[in-house]
Amino acid sequence: MPTSIDRNELQLLLTEQEAQLVEVLPASEYEDEHLPGAINIPLKELDRQTTSRLDRGRPVIVYCYDYQ
Amino acid sequence: MSPRAAWRLESIGFEQVYDYVAGKADWGSFGLPLEGAEGSETRVAAFVRTNAPNCRLADRVREACEHLEENGWDTCFVLNDERVVLGRIGLRAIRGRKDVTAEEAMTPGPSTIRPSARLRNIVERMQRQQLTSLPVTTPDGRLVGLLTRRDAEDALAAVNES
């Protein structure tokens, strides 16, 4: 089950566990602004092939714009 | 959107999946860096004066505001112990330096903006409303600093030229 985290927990996961950040918004929104180090895999394109570049041995953090 | 993405990743076989539900709106609103075409260099956070004068409710205005104007400040923020902005002391009260408390002299509940606000939007607002400055706070009301109109206009001109 995915775990919801806040800003502080995200920073800990990045520094202590080399977590991977994935923005799931469309590419145009990612190009406008994104968290440092994040890659972009839009939700509509999220599948086995597009996620093959992610390391399954490390945590993956997904985010979009806000709670919506 | 991100909860569905997190579940989708689990369905694909990822075992350590986390969802930062508050997203980049939350990240930026706390003044943390953003990359991209509309990254941090186009946001208010990069141009805030973080040494904005401030005092506590019980402080005497006469002492708290004694040297502000000669140091170029026209405002003083009234904070609580959590650095939450409760009020603002304006130029008239600073110049008067009457022997009253900050609580008595302040204008309560000033309008604030977030560090992630887009510079061009804020400059437009300041010009439209003839504001010389705006306090910048985190979403929970803690003071980040002061954005002056002059700083904001200069920064926007530099961004537009680059």
Image (spheres, helix red, strand yellow):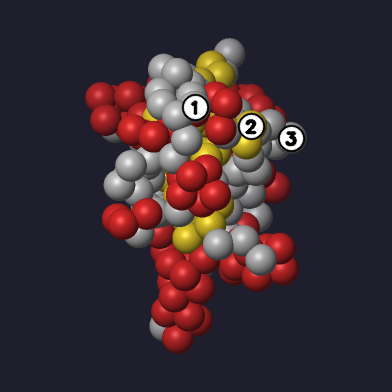
Q: Which residue has dot 2 on it?
A: B108
Q: Which quadrant would residue B88 be assigned to in this image?
A: top right
Front residue of B152 and A15: B152
Q: Position of residue B126 (x, y in %)?
A: 63, 64
Crowding near the residue tagged with mark 1, few <14, some 14–19, many ≥20 C-alpha atoms within 10 Å: some
- Residue drawn at x 42%, y 79% as measured from the top left: B158
- In the shown orientation, is residue B98 left or right of residue B122? left
Front residue of B118 and B68: B68
Asked if labels 2 and 1 touch by Cβ distance under 8 angstroms, the answer is no
Chain of the residue under label 1: B
Chain of the residue under label 2: B
Residues behind callouts 2 and 3 on a single chain: no
The label on residue A68 is 3
Crowding near the residue tagged with mark 3, few <14, some 14–19, many ≥20 C-alpha atoms within 10 Å: few
Alpha-carbon distance for marks 1 and 2?
15 Å
Crowding near the residue tagged with mark 2, few <14, some 14–19, many ≥20 C-alpha atoms within 10 Å: some
Alpha-carbon distance for marks 1 and 3?
47 Å
Name the element at disc 1: loop
The label on residue B100 is 1
Q: Position of residue B95 (x, y in %)?
A: 46, 49
Up/down of B53 relative to B133, above or below: above
Say what amino acid the circle numbered 2 marks.
Pro
Disc 1 versus disc 3: nearer the observer: 1
Q: Which of pointers 1 and 2 lies earlier in the amino acid sequence?
A: 1
Whether residue B32 is visible, yes or no, is no
